Amino acid sequence: MDQKVGLFILLAAGLLCLSLVPVCRADDEVEDIEGEDLDVDVDDELEMDAQDEVPPAPKTPPAPKVTYKAPEPMGEHFFAESFDRGTLDGWVLSSAKKEEADEDIAKYDGKWAVEEMKDSKLPGDKGLVLKSKAKHHAISAQLLRPFTFDTKPLIIQYEVNFQSGIDCGGAYVKLLTQTPDLDLDQFVDKTPYTIMFGPDKCGEDYKLHFIFRHKNPKTGEFEEKHAKKPDADLRTYFTDKKTHMYTLVVNPDNSFEVLVDQTVVNSGSLLTDMTPPVNPPAEIEDPDDHKPEDWDERPKIQDPDSVKPEDWDEDAPAQIPDESAVKPDGWLEDEPEYIGDPDAVKPEDWDEDMDGEWEAPQVPNPACETAPGCGAWKRPMIDNPNYKGKWKPPMIDNPNYQGVWKPRKIPNPAYFEDLHPFRMTPFSAVGLELWSMTSDIFFDNFFITNERTTAERWANDGWGLKKAAEGAAEPGLAAQMLNAAEERPWLWVVYVLTVALPLVLIFVFCCTGKKKSTATPAQYKKTDEPQPDVKEDEEEEEEEEEEKAEEAEKGSPDAEEKSDEEESQAEKEATADEKLEDDVLRRSPRSRKPRKD
């Protein structure tokens, strides 16, 4: 709760700072234009204030309500199921038992239901829900027609929502191989499938399977090929309790893509990115080849010519007493370090015949508390400078080293080369064969096609609508931040650094006052504020200097002529200055001053 209060205080401080921005800006503007004409009509000022007022921001309209409409398959497709009929028509529940399982859990008796999500944002949108936990579940349905891998891609997509999270269980789908004896009523884990695809989780191992069964062209046996693990972090898809759409695209050029919510999370080639590889190696190690008994794999050996030095003492101890150490003054050799507790009392039920002679428990000797030590003093131990340990001859390169032995290579008798693994076995049904320790796994909008545009249209009409509804119902930014911080407390540090620091910088930038600029004469003339008589003092000093110059230049005809010219020029300049001053005074009649003749 204290964390939430702290965040709200930060948010309030941010709003307060933002509200101070226009005020601070206005104060700066007042300082910049101080001295402007104040003779403004009151009505005009009121009108200007009204214009400066910012109208309140309109209220955010409520999020639009998303109306559900069942997606309709368009274009070529092999399977489409939205469950909006509200029934399991067309689906077959397995009645088989799982082999090699305990009798009490061997039966596929897990419960299925068609219903809306518990927290549905789209009333009327129904899906297939795995209802029980710690049970085997198996359900399947026939395609409209078998899918054959030829010249068009395979695209399968469906939606999953782990409404209650997931502890250990899967939500993957199996594309069941077309065989003459395929019986959906007996659908079990060993029923042949062509592709297995979808999310799976147990413990902290989050997986997104893409497995296909490849047929060996030489032996006719099938082997599972697993796609490499996605680089993306899959944890969120299992924990956020949102609906996610899983898509697999397998192309005729042997490339594949795995998408979650229409975003690629894994991709590669059937030829190079599967484990084990589709094609076996051309050569293998000869199983009948054995390492010779005299094969020497030692890169280093002990030098056989090395001899232990005569002064090498193998018996010298690693540590010896420090002979330079001196017993500290005040050491109490006659006092034991521990004594019997004088306050201890023998228990009343102590039986010396059964328990032996009673002894008081040992406690530190109080006499040793102020002394450097008690009991027998021993010199401290130090490293022995003459210690060398057991002598060993030095190591040298082995002149007989032959390297690490490996069996020779022979042609692989099982080698084959399949350059078109895309041509998998046809499949004719889709099924869910799952074990889960968590219930309420929601499945919806299964779709299988060979056209990208058709798949995208189905996705937009189904999952796209669901995503829009979930987005409209999501909490605001503040609530999301609080929820995230509750799950990850370290986010509070991030909030402080990313919110508080910028707010302080904004406040300093916005509300730091600017230095008041020096007013110009024109600004003084627009107001009634008195102006310093600096100009008049300067004019008096200039007149005194001119009088002195005239007295000094008297008696010289050239000087008189020059003086006459200067006087004439000065009169012209004075006349121009007077005209300029008259113009200024006319614009501001209240600031007129008597002019000197």
Image: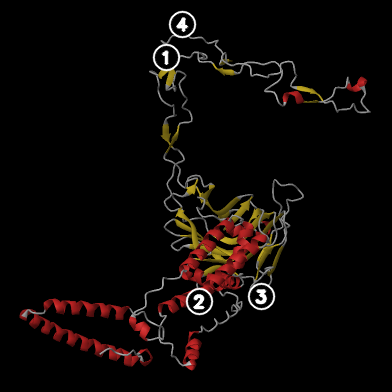
Q: Earlier in the sequence, mark 3 or mark 1?
A: 3
Q: Secondary structure at mark 3?
A: loop
Where is residue 294? Give x, y as percent: 45, 18
**Could you tell me if residue 142 is visible in this image?**
no
Q: CA distance from mark 3 to mark 2?
A: 49 Å
Looking at the image, is mark 1 or mark 4 nearer the viewer?
4
Residue hosting label 1: 303
Amino acid at the residue labelled 3? Pro
Using the rendered image of the protein, determine whether residue 512 is visible from the camera's viewpoint.
Answer: yes
Q: Marks 1/4: CA distance?
A: 18 Å
x, y percent for residue 480: 60, 65
> On the rendered structure, is 472 left or right of 570?
right
Mark positioned earlier in the residue sequence (4 or 2): 2
Label located before the other in sequence (4 or 3): 3
Element carrying mark 1:
loop
- Give the residue at the far left of this rendering: 557
Between the residue at mark 3 and the residue at mark 1, the CA separation in whole angstroms equals 85 Å
- Crowding near the residue tagged with mark 3, few <14, some 14–19, many ≥20 C-alpha atoms within 10 Å: few
Kindly identify which numbered label has been placed on residue 326. none
Is there CB contact under 8 Å for labels 4 and 2? Answer: no
How far separated are the C-alphas under marks 4 and 3? 95 Å
Give 238 or 587, whichever is nearer the viewer.
Answer: 587
Separation of residues labelled 2 and 1 (CA atoms): 89 Å
- Contact check, label 2 and label 1, Cβ < 8 Å: no
Residue 563 falls left or right of residue 471: left
Mark 1 and mark 4 lie on one chain; the one further toward the N terminus is 1
Contact flag, marks 4 and 3 (Cβ < 8 Å): no
- Mark 4: amino acid: Glu
For mark 2, what is the residue?
Answer: 23
Classify the position of the N terminus by image quarter.
bottom right
